[in-house]
Image (cartoon, coloured by chain):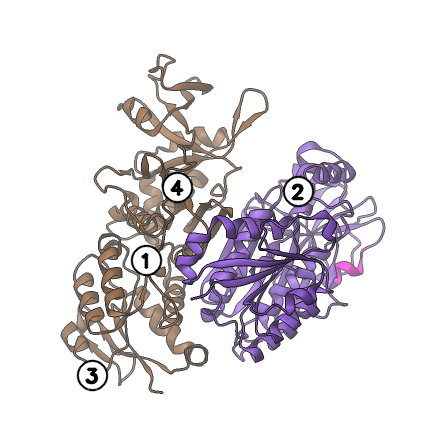
Chain colours: A brown, B purple
Amino acid sequence: MSALRIALLGYGTVGNGVYKTIQTHQEKLKRILGNDVKIVAILVKNIEKHLAPDSDVLLTDDFKEIITLDKLDVVIDAIVGKEPSFSYLQQAINKGCHVITANKEMFAHHGAELKQLAKEQGVTLGFEATVAGGIPIIQNLRQLLNVNNIQKVQGILNGTSNFILTKMREDGCSFETALKVAQENGYAEADPTNDIEGYDAFYKAMILSELAFGEKPDWEESIRIGIKPITPEQIKLFTSFGYRFKHIASIEKTAAGIIFSVKPVLVNETHPFYQIEGVQNAVSIDGDIVGNISLQGPGAGMFPTASAIIEDLVYINKYSFSPTFLDEQNGLGLKLSSTYWAIGGDMVSENLPPHIKIIDRLHPNVLLVEASEEDIYSIQSPDIYCYQVLGKVLIEEAALVD
Amino acid sequence: MSALRIALLGYGTVGNGVYKTIQTHQEKLKRILGNDVKIVAILVKNIEKHLAPDSDVLLTDDFKEIITLDKLDVVIDAIVGKEPSFSYLQQAINKGCHVITANKEMFAHHGAELKQLAKEQGVTLGFEATVAGGIPIIQNLRQLLNVNNIQKVQGILNGTSNFILTKMREDGCSFETALKVAQENGYAEADPTNDIEGYDAFYKAMILSELAFGEKPDWEESIRIGIKPITPEQIKLFTSFGYRFKHIASIEKTAAGIIFSVKPVLVNETHPFYQIEGVQNAVSIDGDIVGNISLQGPGAGMFPTASAIIEDLVYINKYSFSPTFLDEQNGLGLKLSSTYWAIGGDMVSENLPPHIKIIDRLHPNVLLVEASEEDIYSIQSPDIYCYQVLGKVLIEEAALVD
């Protein structure tokens, strides 16, 4: 049989990792796929900046040269941004190519359309690398969905934010200093907006929502709060109570619809995310049959992401990427979880609206309360901050609630 | 198409969970498998003790009645012990049935033979439920192996032991008291030997070894230490240093062969297993491309185990259970990890053999040392205890080593 011919869109960190991994894993891939695997073309933005890694690889800045290749089996998308990625993958699918993407922003916006198109054309669409780098979360969710209805998915999906929060706590430094260290270590871009404002985690959570629940919440109404509001003083204060800040994406199916948020949250040591530190990612899944499963691992990086892309490659022609079937029993037995919040600031008093129940006073300026997400945001003001609290919360004497 | 006809061997907790889950998931399974799924027969040991759950289900204590059924597609093994499980599954495979097993003791001993037989007969062999209950560790390892060479697998694979260790630490109680609580909660058998002596974890680790490395270490030479030697005093002492006891199975591929152990270990809060508490299980995998991935979740229980079994069912006819192909590059770049140990007892002095390097004195009677597993056991005596230490170990001033 002739070789499996692949075009690689993008030759930055991820693209490079894919190229290298395919080169070093020729024998293994051949045994699994029954075929030689060959990268025949690479699309780059600026052709002056790159050299073709091999003389028989077409290096080009013109997608037309790639899409008009005589024989092309797979297109791997390792570029960023909605366009031109979406148009390129549409063209590739229409040509009958299998496609694999690592592009979360594009896939969060156009995943459903690409899935539909791939189904019509009978090709495979892999997107393991769009969420949580090397953690095989897509494959795990898919597998759990075979048996379980998924109730909730939570994750630390952005390594940059988690690195900054870890650094601020460990060194007692400011956000700006921690960001600078992240940039020096290659963990943050020169323009870090996507990471620190929560857009990156937001896109990934949208992809998980569509997979787990077959739908996405309203983009405009979904909560997205970045990590910039967190001060070194807050970190010091909550550390003294046994809490750490984590930037958590949460998607929950409830009778009232999907509750979706990306925001800084406080977790204590009973929570699986407490010791997810630095650039690590983690995802926690609640299924109705299996209970809670958590996964943690590298959320980014050249080789972890390449690993996810090549896992998708292995499933080409083997795995049905048909839409997930969800049971028509939504709302059955589902309820909103009780949520705890730490609210703080000089102006925090016990004169709160009645639907906000005070559980404890952690500190002269910090209250632990029970309230819905809606109610809590209704009292937010420049003088008051509110962070959700995860993990078992100790109430009065030895009364443990989840 | 006619229904997929299943025989269930064993109708205890796991068998019951499988029956109930299949009954309540008829619609979902039909959509995924394209077929109705029907349990047509149940094998029990003592027929007086059971009632057929439905009038058209054959309830029998005679396997012959099952294996001679006219049409039988799948046999699910939910019984314990090597025999008669192994013979029954051989017969089922030879008849052309797909088989799924939750029987770790049998599979640890006879997995390779069953895999070979299943391959010859062209049927599927599922064993997700043999290790770590609801955590999809088999599927994850298999998937990671498509791209990665696995270097190390570590796990808390026995919920009973972990529950007892957690209880002893939390309540300051004795092993006997904690075991009694475990038994009262249904987390330990009347005869707890398999769990507390580490046999259960040992079987599971053997299954993981064969999957990850294509081979098992020598059974006789492999270390298996249970949790009984751990005293409440030791727990209290190490808790004060920031360490918790965890019962960990470890399988590592090295240039010298597979290093395998099941034993109590000390972990600090930098280690992913530190907050795995109670009956939870966890598995950590080191792959050469992806880095470290950890999974945690329910290690046992009616529905988590049923979930794993039904995940296997979904892969019937879809998934190749062919043996894993390992690259022929063993020994390349592999080395023994440095290992740290806490050694303690009244007789602990600094007069240790020279190959045991003293790092720190944690306490008048406890030393932190660096040594190989072999060397450390050479100094063991009734007056000295040795526990391996995992997590980042702080050496002198701020020098962090992994």
Chain letter of the residue carrying label 3? A
Q: Give x and y (percent) for residue A134.
A: 41, 59
Residue type at mark 3 is: Asp
Residue in view at x 57 percent, y 59 percent: B40
On-image quarter of the C terminus of chain B: bottom right
Residue that numbered label 4 is attached to? A165
Q: Quadrant of residue A44?
A: bottom left
Answer few, some or many: residues within 10 Å of disc 4's Cα (few below 14, many 20 plus, some between 14 and 19): many
Q: CA distance from mark 3 to mark 4?
A: 50 Å
Residue that numbered label 3 is attached to? A70
Q: CA distance from mark 2 to mark 4?
A: 32 Å
Residue type at mark 4 is: Leu
Residue that numbered label 2 is attached to? B163
Q: Is residue B321 above or below residue B280?
A: below
Q: Give x and y (percent) for residue A207.
A: 31, 52
Seen in the image, is B357 located left or right of residue A363?
right
Chain letter of the residue carrying label 2? B
Dot placed on the residue nearer the N-terminal end, 4 or 1: 4
* B134 in the magenta segment: no
Chain letter of the residue carrying label 1? A
Residue that numbered label 1 is attached to? A323
Q: CA distance from mark 2 to mark 3?
A: 61 Å
Residues in magenta?
B375-380
Residue in view at x 21 percent, y 39 percent: A220
Q: Tell us which disc is closer to us: 3 or 1.
A: 1
Dot placed on the residue nearer the N-terminal end, 3 or 1: 3
Residue in view at x 36 percent, y 27 percent: A372
Q: CA distance from mark 3 to mark 1?
A: 31 Å
Q: CA distance from mark 4 to mark 1?
A: 37 Å
